[in-house]
């Protein structure tokens, strides 16, 4: 069901892109914007691992340097039938973790020092299994394609805005300027909301995969609660564009206006689903 939901959300973004492109410049304009956005985002996809790790000063570690973390990842990767990923530690007090890399063969699983110090062994297995669930589900690729479509829609919205301001409705052709202005306002917001829905859905799927891989759904639930409590009380200043990568939102989000704008499902919803798996 979760895979089907992602499919329909991605299809919705594509339809949205084609419709807006058709209104503004026909199919050629939509394809051109999508191709440009895809090239930009594929560069990020190909290099995301090294860029994000450098951003957070993550240090690759070996089994002898971090035996507890390394062996947890090793066990969970074996359970999942995945190649052993690289393991890195982020020098950050907030307990958190993320996975990156363009495919399972080039994956990196990173955990903060705060996470390693806070959780017990079962909880650590649950968190590492969750991150490997992202790798198994190819979530980096899916988020890249979604970002490319949202980027293309945003570019088309900018074209609509400038067309309304300077082009008007030349010789009676094309949408009315009021329609273009409305499109320029609504389109990026709507596309961003769909992207957030995709992100939340992938988190649910990674939780399910993590519970299955580790065989410890309640240990993952316990870890999520600890991480959520810390992030709400002591959010950290991270790049908002990478917040979706972490297992819980490091920015806290206590005062979020609406669940629609969340990159992650609420932790209580995630815990409730994990309880049902027991």
Image (cartoon, helix red, strand yellow):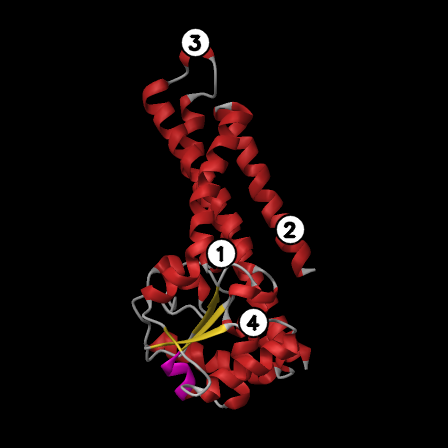
Can you tell which of label 3 and label 1 is closer to the viewer?
3
Nearer the observer, 25 or 72: 72
Can you tell which of label 4 and label 1 is closer to the viewer?
4
Residue 171 — which label?
3
Calculate the distance from the C-alpha at mark 3 to the C-alpha at mark 4: 56 Å
SS for callout 2: helix
Work out which quarter of the rendered image holds the N terminus and state it.
bottom right
Location of residue 53 in the rendering, given as x and y in whole percent from the top left corner: 37, 66
Q: Quick check: can you spot residue 222?
A: no
Closer to the N terminus: mark 2 or mark 1? Answer: 2
Can you tell which of label 3 and label 4 is closer to the viewer?
4
Closer to the N terminus: mark 4 or mark 2? Answer: 2
Q: Main secondary structure of the magenta part?
A: helix
| Residue at figure coordinates x 48%, y 31% from the top left | 32
Can you tell which of label 2 and label 1 is closer to the viewer?
2
Q: Is mark 4 in CB contact (under 8 Å) with mark 1?
A: no
Q: Quick check: can you spot residue 170?
A: yes
Q: Residues within 10 Å of mark 4 (few under 14, many from 20)?
A: many
SS for callout 3: helix
Closer to the N terminus: mark 2 or mark 3? Answer: 2
Quadrant of res 126: bottom right
Quadrant of res 15: top right
Q: Is mark 2 in CB contact (under 8 Å) with mark 1?
A: no
Q: Is residue 71 above or below residue 108?
A: below
| Residue at figure coordinates x 48%, y 80% from the top left | 225
Residue 132 — which label?
4
Work out which quarter of the rendered image holds the C terminus and state it.
bottom right
Calculate the distance from the C-alpha at mark 4 to the C-alpha at mark 1: 26 Å
Closer to the N terminus: mark 3 or mark 4? Answer: 4
> Looking at the image, which residue sits at the far left?
237
Calculate the distance from the C-alpha at mark 2 to the C-alpha at mark 1: 19 Å
Closer to the N terminus: mark 4 or mark 1? Answer: 4
């Amino acid at each position: 069901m979760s895979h089907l939901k992602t499919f329909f959300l991605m299809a919705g973004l594509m339809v949205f892109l084609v419709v807006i492109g058709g209104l503004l410049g026909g199919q050629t304009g939509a394809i051109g914007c999508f191709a440009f956005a895809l090239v930009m985002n594929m560069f990020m996809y190909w290099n995301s691992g090294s860029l994000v790790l450098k951003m957070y000063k993550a240090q690759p570690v070996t089994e002898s340097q971090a035996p507890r973390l390394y062996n947890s990842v090793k066990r969970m990767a074996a359970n999942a039938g995945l190649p052993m990923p690289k393991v890195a530690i982020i020098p950050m007090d907030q307990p958190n973790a993320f996975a990156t890399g363009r495919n399972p063969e080039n994956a990196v699983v990173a955990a903060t020092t705060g996470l390693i110090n806070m959780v017990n062994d079962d909880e650590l297995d649950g968190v590492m299994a969750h991150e490997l669930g992202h790798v198994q589900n190819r979530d980096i690729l899916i988020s890249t394609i979604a970002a490319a479509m949202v980027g293309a829609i945003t570019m088309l919205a900018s074209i609509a805005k400038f067309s309304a301001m300077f082009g008007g409705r030349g010789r009676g052709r094309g949408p009315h300027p009021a329609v273009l202005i409305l499109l320029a306002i609504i389109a990026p917001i709507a596309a961003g909301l769909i992207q957030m829905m995709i992100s939340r859905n992938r988190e649910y799927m990674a939780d399910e995969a993590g519970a299955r891989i580790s065989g410890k759904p309640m240990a993952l639930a316990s870890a999520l609660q600890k991480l959520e409590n810390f992030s709400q009380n002591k959010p950290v200043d991270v790049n908002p564009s990478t917040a979706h990568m972490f297992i819980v939102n490091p920015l806290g989000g206590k005062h979020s206006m609406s669940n629609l704008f969340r990159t992650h499902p609420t932790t209580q919803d995630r815990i409730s689903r994990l309880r049902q798996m027991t």
